Amino acid sequence: MGFADLQPILQSLLESGKYSDLTISCEGQNFEVHRAIVCSQSPFFKAAVRGGFKETSSSQVELPDDKLATIQRVISFLYNQDYDEISIFDTQDAKDAITEVVQPCSTVQNNFEVFLAADKFDIPSLKTLAKTRLIDWIEKNPEKLSQIVRDIWVNIPPFETELKNAIINAISYNADTFLKHDEGIKILSDLPELTIAVLKETVDENTRLKLRSRKMRGGW
């Protein structure tokens, strides 16, 4: 039996809360989940269950610093190995309580919040999925970069070079578009580390173009 066969069963367990032995609480909403599913994929929750956090005695983990929509996506991934990057997943407690209005850059913001949550909860596969979606959006939406770059750049973990490089390359290759917006100019003014990285990439790209041009002309 493959995951495709198990997925409807896992989704049913998530929706019904049947056989639940762990409660995750966020913004007043409770998620009745299963330790075998959640803790096997997240050392963070595994530590909570084993006694790393005070909530263990009641089999409840409180997440006061996280957004409900993000936690819904995280939990959905743990059961489905996927999450909806646009709409919020309904749960039994939250079904009639939450509505998400989709804004122009809400998709990338949702993915970034999931990315940060995956880093916090130590869920590598979720982090990879969120990062892939982020990079795909960044590469395909240069005209919207100025709306989201600041929030991502200042909050991204310092060791996440792949995501940083995607931002640097996107700005460098689409500098004319990025600098058309006042916010784009202000971002580069406020974030010198990003500005230097963009300038370096621009210089490096110009150097690569010159070398290719020389090769084509046989100038070696």
Image (tube, grey):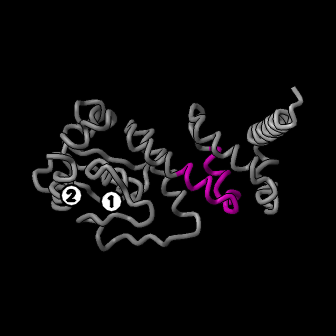
What residue appears at the point 23 percent right and 65 percent down from the top-left corner?
Answer: 92
Assess whether residue 136 is covered by the magenta stretch.
yes
Kind of residue at badge 1: Gly
- Distance between the Cα atoms at labels 2 and 1? 22 Å
At label 2, the amino acid type is: Gln
Quarter of the image for residue 36 reads top left
Find out whether residue 218 is within the magenta segment.
Answer: no
Apparent side of residue 217 relative to residue 63 in the rendered image (left or right) = right
Using the image, determine if residue 55 lies above or below residue 26.
above
x, y percent for residue 16: 16, 61
* Quadrant location of the C terminus in the rendered image: top right
Sequence order check, earlier mark of 2 and 1: 2
Residue at 32% across, 33% down = 43
> Which is more toward the observer, 54 or 65?
65
Q: Please name the residue that numbered disc 1 is placed on.
A: 28
> 70 or 58: which is nearer to us?
70
Q: Nearer the viewer, residue 50 or 144?
A: 144
The residue at which mark 2 appears reads as: 11
- Closest to the camera, between mark 2 and mark 1, is 2
Q: Which picture quadrant has residue 68?
A: bottom left
Whether residue 196 appears in this view of the structure is no
Query: Considering only vertical position in the picture, is 3 above or below 44?
Result: below
Give x and y (percent) for residue 134: 54, 51
Q: Residues within 10 Å of mark 2 (few under 14, many from 20)?
A: some
Q: Which residues are magenta?
A: 134-154
Q: Position of residue 124 (x, y in %)?
A: 40, 37
Label 2, secondary structure: give it: helix
